Amino acid sequence: MSKILCVIDGMTDQSFRVNNYLNLSSMRLLRHIDTTQGQTPESLGCILRLLGTKKVPLHLRGYAEALGYGIHVNKNDLIFRGSWFSLDEQGRCNIPTPAPESIAEGEGYYYHLEQYKSLLVFPNMANCVADIVTYPPYACNGKDARTLCPKRCIAASRVFQSQLAENRCLILWGQSAPAKIAPFSQRAAVICGTPIVKGIAKLLNMDLIPLSGATGDIDTDLLEKMQATLNAAKNYPFVLLHINGADEAAHRKNPNEKTAFLRKVDMVVINSLLQSEHDIYVVSDHGTDPITGQHIGSRQPLFKNVSAKPI
Protein backbone atom coordinates (compact mmCIF):
# COMPACT_ATOMS: atom_id res chain seq x y z
CA MET A 1 0.00 0.00 0.00
CA SER A 2 1.29 3.42 -0.96
CA LYS A 3 0.49 7.01 -0.12
CA ILE A 4 -0.78 9.05 -3.08
CA LEU A 5 -0.91 12.83 -2.78
CA CYS A 6 -2.99 14.42 -5.53
CA VAL A 7 -2.31 18.16 -5.82
CA ILE A 8 -4.96 19.92 -7.92
CA ASP A 9 -3.31 23.22 -8.76
CA GLY A 10 -5.48 26.28 -8.11
CA MET A 11 -8.50 24.15 -7.17
CA THR A 12 -10.18 26.46 -4.69
CA ASP A 13 -11.72 29.92 -5.01
CA GLN A 14 -14.58 31.88 -3.46
CA SER A 15 -17.21 29.84 -5.32
CA PHE A 16 -15.60 26.42 -4.77
CA ARG A 17 -17.98 24.00 -3.03
CA VAL A 18 -16.80 20.46 -2.36
CA ASN A 19 -20.39 19.20 -2.55
CA ASN A 20 -20.37 19.97 -6.28
CA TYR A 21 -17.93 17.09 -6.79
CA LEU A 22 -19.34 13.63 -6.10
CA ASN A 23 -16.14 11.75 -5.35
CA LEU A 24 -14.22 14.50 -3.62
CA SER A 25 -17.18 15.12 -1.30
CA SER A 26 -17.11 11.44 -0.30
CA MET A 27 -13.68 11.97 1.21
CA ARG A 28 -13.05 13.17 4.74
CA LEU A 29 -11.85 16.72 5.35
CA LEU A 30 -8.73 16.18 7.42
CA ARG A 31 -7.73 19.79 8.04
CA HIS A 32 -6.85 23.09 6.37
CA ILE A 33 -3.19 23.70 5.55
CA ASP A 34 -1.31 26.99 5.43
CA THR A 35 0.62 26.33 2.23
CA THR A 36 2.03 29.86 1.92
CA GLN A 37 3.29 30.45 5.49
CA GLY A 38 3.29 34.18 4.88
CA GLN A 39 4.94 33.97 1.46
CA THR A 40 3.52 34.64 -2.00
CA PRO A 41 0.88 32.09 -3.05
CA GLU A 42 2.70 30.35 -5.91
CA SER A 43 3.05 26.72 -6.84
CA LEU A 44 6.76 26.20 -6.23
CA GLY A 45 6.82 27.19 -2.58
CA CYS A 46 3.36 25.81 -1.79
CA ILE A 47 4.09 22.37 -3.23
CA LEU A 48 7.49 22.17 -1.57
CA ARG A 49 5.85 22.93 1.79
CA LEU A 50 3.21 20.26 1.15
CA LEU A 51 6.09 17.84 0.57
CA GLY A 52 7.70 18.74 3.88
CA THR A 53 10.40 21.23 2.87
CA LYS A 54 10.94 23.29 6.01
CA LYS A 55 12.70 26.26 4.46
CA VAL A 56 12.04 27.18 0.83
CA PRO A 57 14.82 29.36 -0.67
CA LEU A 58 13.55 32.82 -1.58
CA HIS A 59 15.15 32.82 -5.03
CA LEU A 60 14.39 29.45 -6.60
CA ARG A 61 11.61 29.81 -9.18
CA GLY A 62 13.55 30.47 -12.38
CA TYR A 63 16.10 27.79 -11.57
CA ALA A 64 13.38 25.22 -10.85
CA GLU A 65 11.77 26.08 -14.20
CA ALA A 66 15.12 25.60 -15.96
CA LEU A 67 15.44 22.17 -14.35
CA GLY A 68 11.91 21.27 -15.39
CA TYR A 69 12.53 22.19 -19.02
CA GLY A 70 16.00 20.66 -19.13
CA ILE A 71 17.72 24.01 -19.75
CA HIS A 72 21.36 24.05 -18.67
CA VAL A 73 22.42 26.93 -16.47
CA ASN A 74 25.71 27.65 -14.73
CA LYS A 75 26.12 28.21 -11.01
CA ASN A 76 26.63 31.98 -11.39
CA ASP A 77 23.75 32.60 -13.81
CA LEU A 78 20.76 34.81 -13.04
CA ILE A 79 17.49 33.25 -14.21
CA PHE A 80 14.05 34.79 -14.70
CA ARG A 81 10.71 33.29 -15.62
CA GLY A 82 8.99 35.37 -18.24
CA SER A 83 5.20 35.56 -18.69
CA TRP A 84 3.64 37.29 -21.68
CA PHE A 85 0.43 39.24 -21.11
CA SER A 86 -2.03 40.99 -23.38
CA LEU A 87 -2.78 44.64 -22.57
CA ASP A 88 -6.13 46.41 -22.70
CA GLU A 89 -6.70 49.81 -24.32
CA GLN A 90 -5.38 51.56 -21.20
CA GLY A 91 -2.16 49.54 -21.19
CA ARG A 92 -3.20 47.34 -18.26
CA CYS A 93 -2.36 43.64 -17.96
CA ASN A 94 -5.27 41.47 -19.01
CA ILE A 95 -4.80 37.76 -19.73
CA PRO A 96 -1.83 35.58 -20.79
CA THR A 97 -0.93 35.71 -24.48
CA PRO A 98 1.25 33.31 -26.52
CA ALA A 99 4.98 33.80 -26.12
CA PRO A 100 7.03 34.61 -29.24
CA GLU A 101 9.53 32.05 -30.41
CA SER A 102 12.35 34.58 -30.08
CA ILE A 103 13.14 38.19 -29.21
CA ALA A 104 15.94 40.53 -30.21
CA GLU A 105 19.20 39.49 -28.61
CA GLY A 106 20.20 41.42 -25.47
CA GLU A 107 22.61 40.73 -22.64
CA GLY A 108 21.00 37.40 -21.85
CA TYR A 109 19.50 34.31 -23.48
CA TYR A 110 15.77 33.95 -24.22
CA TYR A 111 14.06 30.55 -24.24
CA HIS A 112 10.55 30.07 -25.57
CA LEU A 113 8.84 27.49 -23.37
CA GLU A 114 5.13 26.94 -24.04
CA GLN A 115 1.89 28.90 -24.12
CA TYR A 116 2.64 32.28 -22.51
CA LYS A 117 5.84 31.15 -20.80
CA SER A 118 9.51 31.91 -21.40
CA LEU A 119 12.81 31.82 -19.55
CA LEU A 120 15.62 34.38 -19.57
CA VAL A 121 19.17 33.64 -18.44
CA PHE A 122 21.78 36.33 -17.76
CA PRO A 123 25.27 34.82 -17.41
CA ASN A 124 27.41 35.64 -14.38
CA MET A 125 24.84 37.94 -12.75
CA ALA A 126 23.64 35.74 -9.87
CA ASN A 127 25.30 37.99 -7.29
CA CYS A 128 22.56 40.61 -7.68
CA VAL A 129 19.58 38.25 -7.29
CA ALA A 130 18.73 39.33 -3.72
CA ASP A 131 18.44 43.00 -4.66
CA ILE A 132 16.06 42.65 -7.62
CA VAL A 133 12.39 43.64 -7.35
CA THR A 134 9.88 42.01 -9.72
CA TYR A 135 6.12 41.52 -9.93
CA PRO A 136 4.66 38.01 -10.27
CA PRO A 137 2.13 37.69 -13.11
CA TYR A 138 -0.61 36.28 -10.91
CA ALA A 139 -0.71 39.64 -9.10
CA CYS A 140 -0.48 41.87 -12.18
CA ASN A 141 -4.03 41.72 -13.51
CA GLY A 142 -5.45 45.18 -14.13
CA LYS A 143 -2.17 46.96 -13.39
CA ASP A 144 -0.51 49.47 -15.71
CA ALA A 145 2.21 47.49 -17.45
CA ARG A 146 4.59 50.45 -17.31
CA THR A 147 4.73 50.10 -13.51
CA LEU A 148 5.88 46.47 -13.67
CA CYS A 149 9.42 46.97 -14.93
CA PRO A 150 11.99 45.00 -12.88
CA LYS A 151 14.00 47.18 -10.53
CA ARG A 152 17.68 47.02 -9.56
CA CYS A 153 18.70 44.96 -12.58
CA ILE A 154 19.58 47.05 -15.60
CA ALA A 155 19.75 44.08 -17.98
CA ALA A 156 16.28 42.84 -17.03
CA SER A 157 14.86 46.38 -17.19
CA ARG A 158 16.20 46.78 -20.72
CA VAL A 159 14.55 43.54 -21.84
CA PHE A 160 11.25 44.59 -20.27
CA GLN A 161 11.32 48.00 -21.97
CA SER A 162 12.28 46.53 -25.33
CA GLN A 163 9.27 44.16 -25.26
CA LEU A 164 6.67 46.64 -23.94
CA ALA A 165 4.25 47.15 -26.82
CA GLU A 166 0.79 48.58 -27.32
CA ASN A 167 -0.95 45.24 -26.99
CA ARG A 168 1.38 43.04 -24.95
CA CYS A 169 4.23 42.96 -22.44
CA LEU A 170 6.75 40.56 -20.96
CA ILE A 171 6.60 40.23 -17.18
CA LEU A 172 9.98 39.13 -15.78
CA TRP A 173 9.76 37.49 -12.36
CA GLY A 174 10.91 34.53 -10.29
CA GLN A 175 14.52 35.77 -10.26
CA SER A 176 16.82 33.06 -9.02
CA ALA A 177 20.20 31.38 -9.05
CA PRO A 178 21.07 27.66 -8.88
CA ALA A 179 20.50 26.23 -5.39
CA LYS A 180 20.15 22.93 -3.58
CA ILE A 181 17.57 21.78 -1.05
CA ALA A 182 17.26 18.64 1.05
CA PRO A 183 15.95 15.59 -0.83
CA PHE A 184 12.52 14.11 -0.17
CA SER A 185 12.36 11.88 2.87
CA GLN A 186 11.58 8.63 1.03
CA ARG A 187 11.65 6.99 -2.37
CA ALA A 188 8.97 8.70 -4.43
CA ALA A 189 7.53 9.01 -7.93
CA VAL A 190 6.08 12.11 -9.58
CA ILE A 191 3.30 12.12 -12.18
CA CYS A 192 2.94 15.53 -13.82
CA GLY A 193 2.93 17.53 -17.03
CA THR A 194 3.90 20.88 -15.55
CA PRO A 195 7.60 21.80 -15.84
CA ILE A 196 7.77 23.57 -12.47
CA VAL A 197 6.71 20.29 -10.80
CA LYS A 198 9.26 18.40 -12.88
CA GLY A 199 11.79 20.86 -11.50
CA ILE A 200 10.58 20.13 -7.97
CA ALA A 201 11.04 16.41 -8.61
CA LYS A 202 14.65 16.99 -9.70
CA LEU A 203 15.34 19.29 -6.74
CA LEU A 204 14.04 16.66 -4.30
CA ASN A 205 15.57 13.61 -6.05
CA MET A 206 12.15 12.15 -6.80
CA ASP A 207 11.65 9.92 -9.85
CA LEU A 208 9.76 11.45 -12.79
CA ILE A 209 7.48 9.00 -14.58
CA PRO A 210 7.47 9.73 -18.35
CA LEU A 211 4.10 10.56 -19.89
CA SER A 212 3.12 11.22 -23.49
CA GLY A 213 -0.18 13.05 -23.04
CA ALA A 214 0.46 15.30 -20.03
CA THR A 215 0.22 18.95 -21.10
CA GLY A 216 -0.13 20.93 -17.87
CA ASP A 217 -3.49 22.33 -19.05
CA ILE A 218 -7.11 21.20 -19.41
CA ASP A 219 -6.27 19.07 -22.46
CA THR A 220 -3.98 16.82 -20.42
CA ASP A 221 -4.62 13.08 -20.61
CA LEU A 222 -6.20 12.46 -17.22
CA LEU A 223 -6.71 8.76 -17.85
CA GLU A 224 -3.02 8.30 -18.62
CA LYS A 225 -2.04 10.22 -15.48
CA MET A 226 -4.40 8.18 -13.31
CA GLN A 227 -3.15 4.88 -14.70
CA ALA A 228 0.49 5.98 -14.35
CA THR A 229 -0.18 6.95 -10.73
CA LEU A 230 -1.65 3.56 -9.84
CA ASN A 231 1.18 1.76 -11.64
CA ALA A 232 3.78 3.81 -9.78
CA ALA A 233 2.06 3.07 -6.48
CA LYS A 234 2.92 -0.60 -6.98
CA ASN A 235 6.63 0.20 -6.70
CA TYR A 236 6.91 3.43 -4.70
CA PRO A 237 5.79 4.13 -1.10
CA PHE A 238 4.89 7.72 -2.08
CA VAL A 239 3.46 9.10 -5.33
CA LEU A 240 2.85 12.76 -6.12
CA LEU A 241 0.16 13.33 -8.74
CA HIS A 242 -0.04 16.94 -9.91
CA ILE A 243 -2.93 18.23 -12.05
CA ASN A 244 -2.67 21.78 -13.34
CA GLY A 245 -5.57 22.58 -15.71
CA ALA A 246 -7.84 24.34 -13.19
CA ASP A 247 -5.13 26.90 -12.44
CA GLU A 248 -4.62 27.66 -16.14
CA ALA A 249 -8.37 28.00 -16.76
CA ALA A 250 -8.60 30.45 -13.86
CA HIS A 251 -5.69 32.50 -15.21
CA ARG A 252 -7.68 32.76 -18.44
CA LYS A 253 -10.57 34.13 -16.34
CA ASN A 254 -12.84 31.31 -17.43
CA PRO A 255 -14.85 30.02 -14.43
CA ASN A 256 -16.94 27.62 -16.53
CA GLU A 257 -13.83 26.03 -18.00
CA LYS A 258 -12.33 25.65 -14.54
CA THR A 259 -15.44 24.04 -13.06
CA ALA A 260 -15.87 21.67 -16.01
CA PHE A 261 -12.25 20.54 -15.71
CA LEU A 262 -12.55 19.96 -11.96
CA ARG A 263 -15.63 17.82 -12.54
CA LYS A 264 -13.68 15.78 -15.07
CA VAL A 265 -10.84 15.34 -12.58
CA ASP A 266 -13.38 14.23 -9.98
CA MET A 267 -14.92 11.59 -12.25
CA VAL A 268 -11.82 10.31 -14.07
CA VAL A 269 -9.07 10.60 -11.46
CA ILE A 270 -10.44 10.81 -7.93
CA ASN A 271 -13.09 8.17 -8.59
CA SER A 272 -10.46 5.66 -9.73
CA LEU A 273 -8.00 6.51 -6.97
CA LEU A 274 -10.64 5.95 -4.32
CA GLN A 275 -11.32 2.48 -5.69
CA SER A 276 -7.68 1.50 -5.15
CA GLU A 277 -6.15 0.02 -2.01
CA HIS A 278 -3.91 3.03 -1.39
CA ASP A 279 -4.03 5.94 1.03
CA ILE A 280 -5.36 8.85 -1.04
CA TYR A 281 -4.99 12.53 -0.20
CA VAL A 282 -6.27 15.44 -2.28
CA VAL A 283 -5.25 19.07 -1.74
CA SER A 284 -4.70 22.30 -3.64
CA ASP A 285 -1.39 24.14 -3.50
CA HIS A 286 -3.20 27.51 -3.49
CA GLY A 287 -6.46 28.92 -4.76
CA THR A 288 -6.85 30.68 -8.12
CA ASP A 289 -9.68 33.13 -8.73
CA PRO A 290 -11.26 32.71 -12.20
CA ILE A 291 -12.75 36.20 -11.99
CA THR A 292 -9.49 38.11 -11.42
CA GLY A 293 -7.08 35.46 -12.71
CA GLN A 294 -4.98 35.84 -9.55
CA HIS A 295 -3.71 33.35 -7.00
CA ILE A 296 -5.33 33.17 -3.56
CA GLY A 297 -3.27 32.55 -0.43
CA SER A 298 -5.97 31.15 1.85
CA ARG A 299 -5.55 27.92 3.84
CA GLN A 300 -6.23 24.89 1.65
CA PRO A 301 -8.47 21.92 2.54
CA LEU A 302 -6.78 18.52 2.72
CA PHE A 303 -9.05 15.55 1.98
CA LYS A 304 -8.33 11.88 2.61
CA ASN A 305 -10.13 8.65 1.89
CA VAL A 306 -11.92 7.31 4.94
CA SER A 307 -9.54 4.35 5.40
CA ALA A 308 -6.30 6.31 5.00
CA LYS A 309 -3.85 6.73 7.84
CA PRO A 310 -3.13 10.27 9.11
CA ILE A 311 -0.69 12.08 6.84
Image (tube, rainbow, N blue to C red):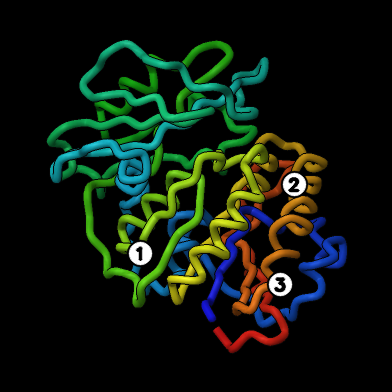
Please identify, in this view, whether the residue under mark 3 or under mark 2 is nearer the observer. Answer: 3
Q: Position of residue 52 (x, y in %)?
A: 42, 74
Residue type beneath disc 1: Val
Circle 3 is placed at which residue position?
274
Q: Is residue 133 visible?
A: no
Q: Residue at x 32, y 41 (%)?
A: 66
Please, what is the three-letter code of the amino acid marked with disc 2? Phe
Label 3–label 2 contact, CB within 8 A: no
Q: Residues within 10 Å of mark 3 (few under 14, many from 20)?
A: many
- Describe residue 223's horizontal placement relative to residue 121 as left or right: right
Q: Is residue 85 above or below residue 229?
A: above
Separation of disc 3 and disc 2 at Cα?
19 Å
- The residue indicated by pointer 1 is 56
Tell me the CA gap for discs 3 and 1.
31 Å
Residue at image location 68% in from the left, 87% down from the top: 307
Q: Which residue does the image show at 36% across and 50% down from the upper left?
A: 199
Place of residue 11 in the rendered image (x, y in percent of width and height, measured from the top left): 68, 56
Whether 173 is drawn above or below 40: the answer is above
* Location of the C terminus (image quadrant): bottom right
Apparent side of residue 164 relative to residue 224 in the rendered image (left or right): left
Q: Is residue 186 above or below residue 168?
A: below
In terms of sequence position, does the residue under pointer 3 or pointer 1 come before the other? 1
Residue 97 x/y as whole percent: 58, 23
Q: Is residue 288 above or below residue 136?
A: below
At x 23%, y 60%, the residue is 180
- Amino acid at dot 3: Leu
| Mark 1 neighbour class, 10 Å CA radius: few under 14, some 14 to 19, many 20 or more | some
N-term mark: 1 or 2: 1
Q: Which mark is residue 281?
A: none
